[in-house]
Each structure stands twice: as C-alpha cells, then as structure tokens.
Amino acid sequence: MSTQGSSQPSPADAHARESVRARLFDQPRNDVRVGRFTLLDKAGEGGMGVVFAAYDPELDRRVAIKLLHSQDPAYVQRLLREAKAMARLSHPHVVTIYETGTAGDRVFLAMEFVRGSDLRRWLAGAPRSWRDALALLVQAARGLAAAHAAGLVHRDFKPENVLVTEAGVAKVADFGLARPIGDRTHDTLPGSRTDSELPAITRDGAIVGTPAYLAPELFEGSPADAKSDQFSFCVAAYEAVYGERPFAGDSLASLADNVARGRVRAAPEHTRVPARVRRLLVRGLASDPKARHASLAGLADRLDALVARRRRAASVAIVGSIAAASFAGVWQLRPVQCTGAADAWADAWRSSALPELRTSMAASGHPGAVVTADKVAALLDGYGAQWMASHVDACEAHRRGVQSADLLDRRMACLDARHHRVDTLVAALERADATMVERAIQTVSDLPSVADCDDAEVLARAHPLPDDPAARERVLDLEQRYGEADVLRDLGQLQAAKEAFATVRELADALEYRPIQAFARIRQLDLTNGTPALRDGLYEALHLAEAGGDEFAARYAWVELIRTHGYLGEFDAADRAARHAEAYVQRSGGSARELSIVADRIAMMNIDRGDRQTALREAQRALSLLESADPDSPALVPLLGHLGTAYTSLDENDLAAPVYERAYEHAVTTLGENHRDVAIALFNLGRVTARQEQYDASNDYYRRALAIMHAVGGDEELTSIFILNNLGQNYGHQGHYPEAIASVLEAISLQERRSGPRHRVLVRPRRGLAEIYLDAGDHERALAESRLALDISVESFGDDHHESAACRRRVGQVLVALHRAAEAVPLLERALKDETAQKAPGRQQGLTRYWLAVALHG
C-alpha cells in the first residue's frame, strides 16, 4: 500500500517490493527497516494495520512490528499517544508493546512476538473440552481486566485477537482499537478502505469492531467501555465452549436485532457444559450493560473457580450414573473415599454467594429483596446440607456393598436432578425481577424432596431410565430441561415457562418418553382458569401418565382435577378426582405434605359447593398435615387463610379472626413484611373485622394491604381489586357513599381491563355496588347493578349456585325498596330455596327470610 501524497514508499510497500525483486532475480533481499527493527516476513494483516515478524538488533530478539493504516497527521498523533499508553500496560496475558514510533507518516508498534496460534485455530486444532477452552479464556479475561484497570478498553475482542503460545498461555493482542474508557471520539478511520472491503466495520463509521462480537449499545453509537468488552468476551467464550455463537443472524440487521433483544440460543442438545457456566456467560451477554457482571475481573474469578471445582469434583466424587457404573469395577479393587459432595454442591450454591444474591435481587426494585435473599440463602444452605449428606450416604452404601449398582444409579440420577434444579434456580435469581423475588422463598421451599433420593421404594416407582447410554443421556437432558422450565414457572415467568415447556413436550414426543410428555402437557395448561379446556387437557395428560405407568404425573393430574371440576361446578367429578388423588398419594407412601395438598383442594372445592362443614373439616386436616411435616413452611400461610375462610363461611367470625392473625404473623416471619401473601393476610383480617362491624379497624387492615400491593407493583392485580371493593363496601356501611362508589367502581374498572365486563369475579363487586346505591337512595342504579350481577352469576356459576341466590336476594331487596314487592317475592323465594338446599349460613338465610317477609307484607 503506497502512501498518498508521499514520494517515499511505505515500509510495507518497500518490504513487498524488495521481496518480489529478490524472488525474481534470485538475489539476497535487502533489509527494510522500521526504526531500528529489520522487517523479516509478513505475518498478517487486519483492519488496523499490517504485522511483520522483525528483528531487534539491539536486544537480539525477535519482535512483531505492526504498521498502522493511517496518513492523517492528527490521527497519527492520536494513535501514537494511545500506543504509548498501551505500552505502559504490562501483564502476562497481554501482548507486550515494547516501543512505539513513526516510520514516515505511519505509526508502528514493536510488540512481543508470540510463537503459537490464535484462539480460533487453537480450538480447531484438536478436540478441546469445555474446561480446557474456558481455562484459556479465563487467562484472556485476566488480560482484558488488566487493561480495564489501566483505563483502557479493547473494543474488538474476538478469538483472532487472543494468541495462544506453544506453552498454552493466552495473550490478548491487537489493542489497535483501544481507547480510554468512555472516549466518544468519532471512530471512522481516515484513509481507510472502502465499505465493501471492511466487513468488520459498519459503513457509516459509527461502529468499529467485528459485529458478531459487538455489544448492543455499540450498535446504537454509545461509547465503548469495560462492559462492552465484557460482552465481547462472553460471545467469544460462549463460542469456545459450545462451538457456536450465542446469537443467530445471517445479516448485520438480524444479528443486531437478536443481540438487542437478548435472544441467546438454547444450549446445544446433549451439551456437557454446566448450567452455571452458561448462566455466567449469558449474564455477560445481557443487552442492558447494567445487568452484566460488575467487572470482567469478577467474572474471571467465578469462571476460574468453577473450572477448578469441576476438575476437583471430577477426580474425587461420583457425579452421576455413568460415573458410578464406570467406577464400579475399580471400587472392587481398592477403597474409595466418598468425598467431594461439598465441591459438587458448591457448583450450584455456596453460602459465600449471599452478597451477590442480595445485590442481584435488590436490583429488581422489590422492597423486600434483601430480606428475601437472606431467607432464600438460609433455605438453600439447609437443602444443601441434606443433599450433601444424601450424596455421601449413597456413595458409602455402595462402597460397603449394601446397595446395588442399579439403586446407586437411581439415587445419583435423583440427586443430579435436584442439583440441576437448584443450579437453575440460583441462575434465575441472579437476574431476578420483582415477580421472581416475590416467589423465590416459596419456590425454594417447594424444591423436590432430597429424602426421596434415599427412599428405595420411591425410586423404584419412578420411570426407569433407558439402558442404552445415548438414549439415557437424551432422557436425562430432557429431564433437566423440564426442571429448568419448572423453575421458570414457579418463579412466575409464565410466558418463558410456556415456551420452554412447549420445547420439552416436542422433545418428549420425539423420544416417546411418557413421564415428561404428561408433566409437560400439564405445565402448558393455565391451571387457574377453570375452563373445560383445562379439564380436557388434564385428562389428556392423565391418560399419558397412566399409559406410561407414571404415578407421579397421574397423581398430580388428579389433584388439579379436584380444583378444576369444583370451579366448573362438576362436584361429583371433583369427588371422584379426590378419591383417585388420595389413593395415589397413599400408594406412594402417604407423604403428609402431599396429603395436605389434596385435603386443601377438597376444602376449597366444598366451599364452592356450599358444603361448609366438609370444607372446614378438610381445611383443618390440610393444616394439621402440613404442620406436622414442615411447621416453618410458608405454604402454611394460604392453608391458614383457607381455614379462616371455612370459618367465615359458617359465620364463625370469632374463630376465624385468630386464624387470620396467625396467617399474618407466619407470613411476616417466613416471607418478610413486603410480600403479597402478607397483603392477603391483612385483607382477610379486614374481611373478618368488617363482618364483626369493626369498620375502622377493617379499613386500616385494607389500607395496609393496599400499601404493600403498591410497593410490590401489584396495583392492578386481583388482590388489589378485592381490597378496593371491600374498602368501598366498608365506606358504604359507614355512610361515606361518594368514597364507597368511587372505590368499588375503581375495582370494577381494573377487573374489566383484566378479563372483560362479564367475568365471574365481578359478581360480588356489582352486587355490593347495588347495595351502596340502594343505601344512598339511588334505587334505579341499584336495580341495574343487582340485575347485572345476577346475570353474570348465572352465566358463570349456574342458576342454583349460592352466589346466584345472593344476587337474587339483592334484586328482591331493591325491588322492595322500589315498592315492587310482587316482583320481589318469586326472586326471594327462589333464593331461600337454593340457600336452604345448600345449607347456607344462618345469617344469609335470615336476611333472605327477612326481605321475603317484608315483600309479602308490603
């Protein structure tokens, strides 16, 4: 390349001409010098310059000379200043710059000469494990972090810019794009080649670097910094360990879109790269720089520790069924020390990670994040202690010869599944949003029991793994994917979970693996909507489970069918589902926790049915069972709430109040003060005190509940809607009609935005609004609201449901006030008939009898 406007050829051109002359005339090549350095051979060329191998006669060493592409005098001076800054950086994992200077109008860098290859060629040169690849990348990360500490960023980190010495040492090279951190100076290269010749640089000159490795903020023209280098590093590291880049894209536009939206590819099927490695890399690939790791140095530390732990664990611990089988013959020859459980567990969770967990969860903005993080950590520590004890026991039992190889295989597969679920859970919590924080404690509390991994009978009932090793790996991978999707669901990431379960179901269908087919089908359903489609979907999953002999999935389907049939008013079918569910639980050993779930479902179904005595009995049984199994479980909070509801349905308000108080205290203790379950407990206290006509106290409970819902971002959620409605009813009872009407109408408006104007949830607010209008003297509006409530109730619950009976009573009451008693009588008679048949509480029947008497004598 000649220098425009100069009579002298550039050193690069002179070297090229001299090489051609020497070959043509078979003569020795004359030396071409750059400063004191003698150019030997051209080693390569990049977007920023040409690299030569060269000789330094003063120090008698081989060096690399890089001649930078630029002729603009101002730009030359800037490059020279930056090169001198880089020359002050000395680190074993950065290519050292010995000297900087100019040759004519070109800046040159005299650098350390590295014998070896670049990272891309090193990876392709031989099979590399993920550990080997990651260990080398950690070295490169150390070098980049040193540059960051010196106030420099690389801006074009990629595999080609990581040199690997013959001794296997990584050195980051080509800081030719380096700038001080935050430098916003325009990046177009004066005198650079045309757009079509620069695939690594965007055409408008606003972005410099290789697009596949560029952070999204650089596509938008933001200045490069340490966080953008971290992103580039994670792209390269992901590519090194998985064999493919994290973002798809067959054009710059599609690549930029995937990067900006954070669409990281799914991990390749059958990968052996641990979930924790992926989690760390994906965090560094976040589209929002603030969501990435605090520093590249910190990321390097975590990756380095993980590689080291994995190597230690692999050498001393059983880490799965395949390892157990392969070591079986060795154990017969020499004793095995059953160590390594702690190292293996630390891959998923370690107590020292609490500060990081606090920081990550606090970033969600949830007011209870730090308290939640502490409680989650304590629960994980306890779970980990159980896991490690079980891991050691499985190993010791096999070593002593008191456990078959098959049982060891099943125990280790069980433990691995729980380990992976915790690994996935911790990964999710490191990027938690407010919803995930809200559900974190319950999710950890609901982790699958480690005790099941010690129970030979439970393990024997599990669906057997295939004998073929390849098929077994596919099934284990499928189960891990299912566990990952289940964690997303438990943490409230419903859309992501739905998509993940769809993938799991497709893979399970392809493998014809029925246990996962059944569970994935259940998990794809919205278990809260109570529709015929949900009922039919549950029976489809039940068929898959029973055909495949999977008792666990079948039991789960029957339990959910209790609630679904009850919601649909199909109470005989709900009773049948309850009998099946109880039978499955008893057959599997009768876990108190599982029996409590069945009892709770039966209790709530009987509340809907109107069989309040049965509801009370089952609610008491559910609470007693769970208390005996886990007295500290946060799951006691809703069970206490359901017991209180059973009492209030019987007008036993004095018995309900202390139960609700206990629910509130337990919620605060187990979940922290800023939690939706605490708000629900306060809401229930508001309900029962209102029923006791203590309206000021009730209003206080409701306002406290609303404040919590607001703090956790739940202003438009169903709980807030219920609170607003009940607060409005209280205002009405106190004669504050404008405030009452405004509060109830706000509740109705919020619910209509959620589900439309005729959802079943609107029955009670509409009926209550009718009463407020009636008390305020607006009889026509009262009649319109009460009739609308009745219409929605009949559509939603059925003509003879107790909610419809209450609505008929309200219509009759309004008609009596309008002096239309003749129209009121048949409505009130029908209401009393249905309430009597359903054994409604005496207070409700008494109200109906009163208004019927008034109508008959009006």
Image: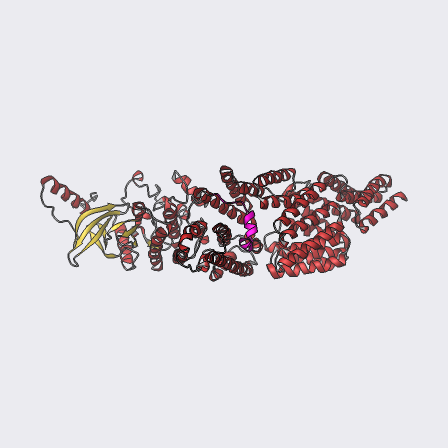
Nearer to me, 63 or 564? 564
Vertical side of 622 occupied by 249: above or below: above
Q: Can the viewer see residue 57?
A: yes
Outermost residue toward the right in this view: 857
Tell me where residue 286 appears, x and y as whole percent.
44, 49
Q: State which region is magenta.
A: 448-466
Colour scheme: secondary structure
> Which quarter shows the N terminus?
top left
| In-front residue for pair 378/395 | 395
Q: Quadrant of residue 369?
A: bottom right
| Residue 383 lies in the magenta stretch | no
Q: Quadrant of the C terminus?
A: top right
User: 594 and 109: which one is in front?
Assistant: 594
Does residue 455 appear to the left or right of 751 in the view shown?
A: left
Q: Quadrant of residue 290?
A: bottom left
Residue at the image position 32 percent from the left and 53 percent from the top: 178
- Residue 119 is situated, as x and y percent measured from the top left of the image, at 31, 49
- Which is more toward the observer, 424 or 814? 424
- Residue 673 seen in the figure: no
Residue 391 x %, y %: 49, 57
Total marks drawn? 0
Q: x, y (%) of residue 223? A: 38, 51
Residue ID at (62%, 53%): 591
Q: Tell me the residue at 65%/59% (across/down).
A: 628
